[in-house]
Structures are given as C-alpha cells and as structure tokens.
Amino acid sequence: MAAQKDFEIQKTDAEWQAQLSPEAFKVLRKHGTERAGSSPLDKVYEPGSYFCSGCGTELFKSDTKFNSGTGWPSFYLPIEGAVETTVDRTLFMTRTEVHCAKCGGHLGHVFNDGPKPTGLRYCMNGVSLEFKANA
Ligand code: FE
C-alpha cells in the first residue's frame, strides 16, 4: 500500500469515488489490478505522454514505453520525480509498488527484468493512466 505520508493532493475516498470510474477507483485508491490485456493503452505507441488518471500529473513519455508482452502498459523509465515506490508484501510476494508522487494513486509495480538502458519494467495499470498524443 502507499506509504502513510502526506501527498500534495489529498481527497477522501468519497471524493475520489465521485471523480473516478469504478475501475480507476479500485486500482488507484484500493491497490487493485486490472485484467491483463484489458487496457487499450497496452497497444498504444504513438508519440505523447501518459498522465496520472487521478490527478493529471505527467508520469511517462511514450519513448520509454515498450511491449513487455504482459498485457499491461510497460515503461522502462518514469519522468523524474513523478512516481515513488514502496515495498509491497501482499499476495505472498515481495514486490515494489509504484504510485503517483503527487496524489499517491497506485499505478502498478516495477520489476528488474526490463530493457536497456535502465533494466527496469514499470508494469502499469492502463486505467491509472491517461494518454495524450503530442500535438
Ligand atoms: Fe496522481
């Protein structure tokens, strides 16, 4: 779960629920995971940026996106300072959870089996992201 810290953007569950789709609320605020292959963003490779669907912060550039074959949108590098991580020990695994640095919304997990240059694989829920193509 996201760390117990004060994020710049703070809302109650009721406020988030009013703003977000049920799927986005479940993932962003309740640490859910969307079904693999369910996000249209998994197959998007146009030039543009990916923003937090909770607060609109720019999180990833399209040139760091790659096809991981997992069914989840995957990136090898976030925009500097845009995301933070915590240790996630749920589901009998130790994983590194990734959340938006500004609103604390859960985005996904990061693994060490990504491509060069970072070797990282940010495995993101598409419902936590909003894509905007470059103008
Ligand atoms: Fe956010």
Image: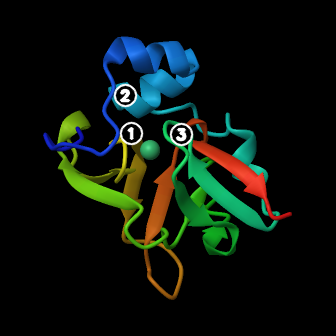
Residue beneath the point at 44% across and 83% down: 118
Please tell me whether mark 3 sits on a helix, a strand or a loop. helix
CA separation in Å, label 1 and label 2: 6 Å
Quarter of the rendering containing residue 4 = top left
Please give the residue where the numbered disc 3 appears in the rendered image. Answer: 128
Q: Residues within 10 Å of mark 3 (few under 14, many from 20)?
A: many
Rendered image: mark on residue 105 = 1
Task: Tell me whether the residue at label 1 lies in contact with that at label 3, contact meaning CB atoms closer than 8 angstroms.
Answer: yes
Residue beneath the point at 63% across and 55% down: 50
Residue extending farthest to the bottom is 117
CA separation in Å, label 2 and label 3: 10 Å
The C terminus appears in which quarter of the rendering? bottom right
Vertically, is 117 above or below 110? below
Q: Nearer the viewer, residue 50 or 126?
A: 50
Q: Would you say the beta carbon of the disc 1 residue lies within 8 angstroms of ligand 1?
A: yes
Q: Quadrant of ligand 1?
A: top left
Rendered image: mark on residue 39 = none
Please tell me whether mark 1 sits on a helix, a strand or a loop. loop
Q: What amino acid does circle 1 point to?
A: Gly
Please give the residue where the numbered disc 2 appears in the rendered image. Answer: 29
CA separation in Å, label 1 and label 3: 8 Å
Q: Position of residue 66 (x, y in %)?
A: 65, 68
The N terminus appears in which quarter of the rendering? top left
Q: What amino acid does circle 3 point to?
A: Ser
Q: What amino acid does circle 2 point to?
A: Arg
